[in-house]
Amino acid sequence: MTRTAQVELIAVYRTEDCPAAIGELLEPLAPDQRGWLEDTETRYPAIKGRLGYVELGDNPLGLTQLVLVDVDGTWLITELK
């Protein structure tokens, strides 16, 4: 994740750091729901300019899309929608 995305996630979950915020985000999920998220492919997003988009479809978090930005050849999450 980009630093901005990390800060936003920390603020939403009111935690000390990003790993703790991710823990809060995932805590209510059942093991099979967590497994579904582990299979999310972010290496090959649909690209538009410097941004990439990964459509999530139906998922246990209720998110619809990951917005990624190319930082030195690596796609980083910059926004959760």
Image (tube, rainbow, N blue to C red):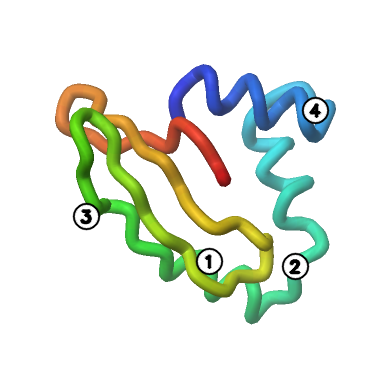
Q: Nearer the viewer, mark 4 or mark 3?
A: 3
Which residue is tagged 2?
29
Tag 4–tag 1 contact (CB < 8 Å): no
Q: Position of residue 6 (x, y in %)?
A: 58, 26
Mark 1 and mark 2 lie on one chain; the one further toward the N terminus is 2
Which residue is tagged 1?
37
Which residue is tagged 4?
15
Which residue is tagged 3?
44
Between the C-alphas of marks 2 and 4, the distance is 18 Å
Q: Amino acid at mark 3?
A: Tyr
Tag 1–tag 2 contact (CB < 8 Å): yes
Between the C-alphas of marks 4 and 1, the distance is 22 Å
* The one of 64 and 32 positioned closer to us in this rendering: 64
Between the C-alphas of marks 4 and 3, the distance is 30 Å
Mark 3 Cα within 10 Å, few/some/many (few <14, many 20+)?
A: few
Q: Amino acid at mark 1?
A: Leu
Q: Quadrant of residue 33?
A: bottom right
Circle 4 SS class: loop
Query: Outermost residue toward the bottom?
Result: 32
Q: Quadrant of residue 47?
A: top left
Mark 4 and mark 3 lie on one chain; the one further toward the N terminus is 4
